[in-house]
Amino acid sequence: MTVNASEATTQILIVDDDSGNRDGLTLLLRQVGYQITATDSGEGALQHLAETTFAIVLTDLRLPGISGLDILRYSKERTPQTHVILMTGNASTETAVEAMKEGAFDYLTKPINVKELKILLDNALEKSRLVAENQYLRQQLRGKYHFANMIGSSPAMQTIFKQMEKIIQTDSTVLILGESGTGKELVARAVHFNSARKEKPFIAINCGAIPGELLESELFGHVKGAFTGAGSDKAGKFEAAEGGTIFLDEIGTMPMQLQMKLLRVLQEREVERVGSSRKIRLNVRIISATNADLAELVKTKEFREDLYYRLNVIPVHLPPLRERREDIPLLVKHFLKKSCEAQNHLPCTLNGEATAALQQYDWPGNVRELENVIERAVALVDGESIELDDLPTQISQHVKSDSGVSFPLFNENGVDLPALVAELECRMIQSALERCDGVKTKAAELLHLNRTTLVEKIRRYNLSV
Ligand SMILES: Nc1ncnc2c1ncn2[C@@H]1O[C@H](COP(=O)(O)OP(=O)(O)OP(=O)(O)O)[C@@H](O)[C@H]1O
Ligand SMILES: [Mg+2]
């Protein structure tokens, strides 16, 4: 048995508590040139799988503790492209058939026949090669700077597109993290509508916008008489998403008692409507998102650690726009085209000064803010060239100092400091209210004000909450 050069970098994980078989296989496969990692337990296997992407896992079916089937499930969720081959002592066909249903590549009966093993490895590697080629071709077709209707040429976005390419091939639970307006919902939709679930529902629910007691019945449904006002049976969003994807937005705001219930749904893949103990099986992919620092909420015990790990199987980090300024020109072009078409406007361009200002600005509201700025500029501009004056003052009037703090430019009349301070105050309050979803107590904390002072300022500036 020999392997060619490309196979020499192929990583294989061998899991067996029987040292004779494990060492024998390790020696044999290492000699022919594969890179072998070997372990004697399921626990060890999961650890290796978490750290390395293997082409093939060759595991004993019956292991003390975490079994071969558990390894298969974990591997399928984490890296579906890894082929898992099971080894059984005395061909317990039933378990082997179950394993095939769960996505095992094949199974071998011990003692291992070297010829049979060689054929299986060849087939598995050939299949991996075809899948990789297919993925590459599809990526080429999609174009480099797009994924669905997401745009980005920065290395950070390129990495995210590659990650999404993998995610759409799986059913794994995804957690999307990023500041407000970075495109979290766009990612969730792109994943769903490019996955095998695309014909089934995509159900989005904003956990922050619904009070705790209502949220429970929204998510899980209720039966008639479960609480006052429950006049009839009602299915929840989880049931509504059957076969498709549920998008749990602002997951960080979920009340503790619901976190417990959600954890159970994730573990059991079953829901119980409020007021009923009948279990309903679910086949729903879960994508959640938050602009909060969830790991920090875990530390401060505001978010359950076990739930965090369940949700965070595949994290997608969307960087703020100010950390990927290379994307700004492409996004501007895209939003200009979109706004001009929507507003029936002749095609517009930005002049040099305006382009530079957009490039310099810090975009606390990220891509959403950029989109709004362009839409507004197209609506206001007289001709076809958008100039500095067509942009909001916070963008046009600021240039960056060396320290990174933005200062307004003086014009021939000097600068109206009270007006500027008021404008800054207004913007900061508005931004804090947005961040805190209009919860004044939280916004006041964020601004180091007491609540009464904040309420007074909101009234004075006539801000909408
Ligand atoms: N990479 C991108 N390409 C094109 N449009 C984008 C991109 N990222 C975001 N957008 C647009 O910006 C707007 C905000 O995106 P989205 O609603 O997905 O953000 P979000 O992270 O969910 O924000 P929030 O935390 O406030 O809910 C949307 O109109 C979206 O279409
Ligand atoms: Mg959102």
Image (cartoon, rainbow, N blue to C red):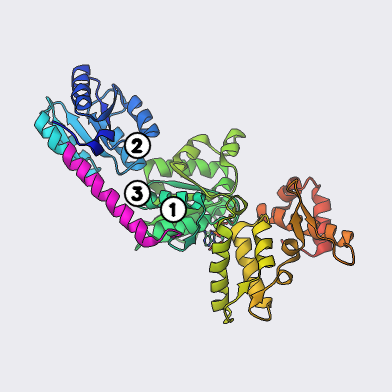
The chief SS type of the magenta part is helix
Q: For this view, does 427 lie left or right of residue 232? A: right
Report the mark closest to the observer, 2 or 3. Answer: 2
Q: Can residue 216 be seen at all in this image of the molecule?
A: yes
Which numbered dot is residue 170? 3
Q: Can residue 92 be seen at all in this image of the molecule?
A: no
* 143 part of magenta stretch: yes
Residue bearing the label numbered 2: 53
Magenta span: 121-146
- Quarter holding the C terminus is bottom right
Which numbered dot is residue 242? none
Mark 3 lies on a secondary structure that is: loop
Distance (Cα) linking label 2 and label 1: 19 Å
If you read the primary sequence from the N terminus, does the residue marked by circle 2 or circle 3 appear first?
2
Q: Where in the figure is residue 178, as x and y percent of width and height?
A: 56, 49
Q: Report the amino acid beneath label 3.
A: Thr
Q: Report the amino acid beneath label 2.
A: Thr
- Quarter holding the N terminus is top left
Quick check: 276 above or below 89? below
Which numbered dot is residue 161? 1
In terms of depth relative to the viewer, which is nearer, 159 or 214? 159
Report the mark closest to the observer, 3 or 1. Answer: 1
